[in-house]
Amino acid sequence: MKKYKAIIDDGCNSELVAGAEFDLPLGIPIIKAPSKSIIPPGITPFSMRKRAPSLDEAIGFYERDINFADVLRSPEAYIDDFGRFAAMISPDCSLYRDAPLSVQLTNVYRNRAIGGYYQRHGLYVIPQIRWGNEYTYTTKYFPEKIAFLGAEKHSLLAIGTHGCFSGMENKYHFEAGLAAMMETLEPEVVLVYGPMPENIFCAHMEYAKFVHYPDWIDRMHGGK
């Protein structure tokens, strides 16, 4: 059979998922649950990794997507760099609620595809969970809650909360998505980067261990 070569780069980076397992039917790559939970002493943003207090830190992507665009384009270039650290959190690609659902689904795919890629190269990867509108954390549209695909149950997860409590609508979707995540994935440990209001998280405390990390700015100014 004659083989045809694509004449353009479709941007899918199919090599990222070579050897991956997938959540079907949507085909989201799976980041495998680690054999043990590594709870880092801190989370350093990607753009601040040269200022990381130690290599025991986890590298996270809690910043504007443009700041880590090179990781999305050329993840292979960062294997050695990220491999110096005890852990990394999969890229926190934005899931804006007003974005088309196809874009939100694509960014879930990117998160898991790149996280899984690094995991298969020997890095310790913690899945970052992010949800957008109700179509991503309920089954109102898809038969699966797409925000949670590609992450295994009873594992270690990470979430970011910056900006999630500003206004009633943001707060509503965060609380609803958090409840859906806990019900769907039943995590053992949840790393929380950013504010962690007790009145929002208290309902889930008995079901998992929550570890709070101040964001980088607060941390550098002595926040706890």
Image (spheres, rainbow, N blue to C red):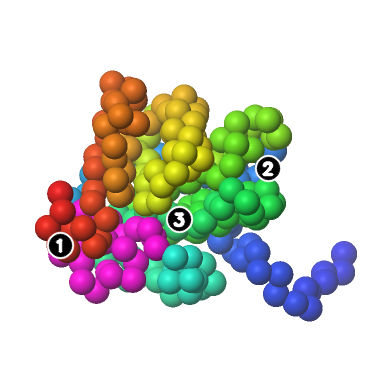
Q: Amino acid at mark 3?
A: Asp
Q: Nearer the viewer, mark 2 or mark 3?
A: 3
Residue drawn at the location 39% of the way across and 63% of the way down: 63
| Residue hosting label 3 | 92
Can residue 222 be seen here? The reply is yes
168 or 59, nearer to the observer: 168
Q: Amino acid at mark 1?
A: His
Residue that extends furthest to the front in the rendered view of this protein:
167
190 within the magenta span: no
Residue that extends furthest to the left in the rendered view of this protein:
222
Can residue 21 be seen here? The reply is no
Rendered image: mark on residue 195: none
Q: Earlier along the polypeptide chain: callout 2 or callout 3?
A: 2
Residue drawn at the location 56% of the way across and 53% of the way down: 96
| Residue hosting label 1 | 221
Q: Earlier along the polypeptide chain: callout 1 or callout 3?
A: 3
Decide if residue 183 is on the left or right side of residue 213: right
Quarter location, residue 218: bottom left
Q: Which residues are magenta?
A: 42-63
Residue 47 % position (x, y): 33, 71
Decide if residue 177 is on the left or right side of residue 7: left
Q: Amino acid at mark 2?
A: Leu
Q: Are marks 2 and 3 in contact (CB under 8 Å)?
A: no
178 or 39, nearer to the observer: 178
Residue 184 % position (x, y): 50, 28
Q: Nearer the viewer, mark 2 or mark 1?
A: 1
Tell me the element at label 2: loop
35 or 75, nearer to the observer: 75
Split into 4 quadrants, where in the image is the N terminus?
A: bottom right
| Residue hosting label 2 | 26
Quarter location, residue 141: top right
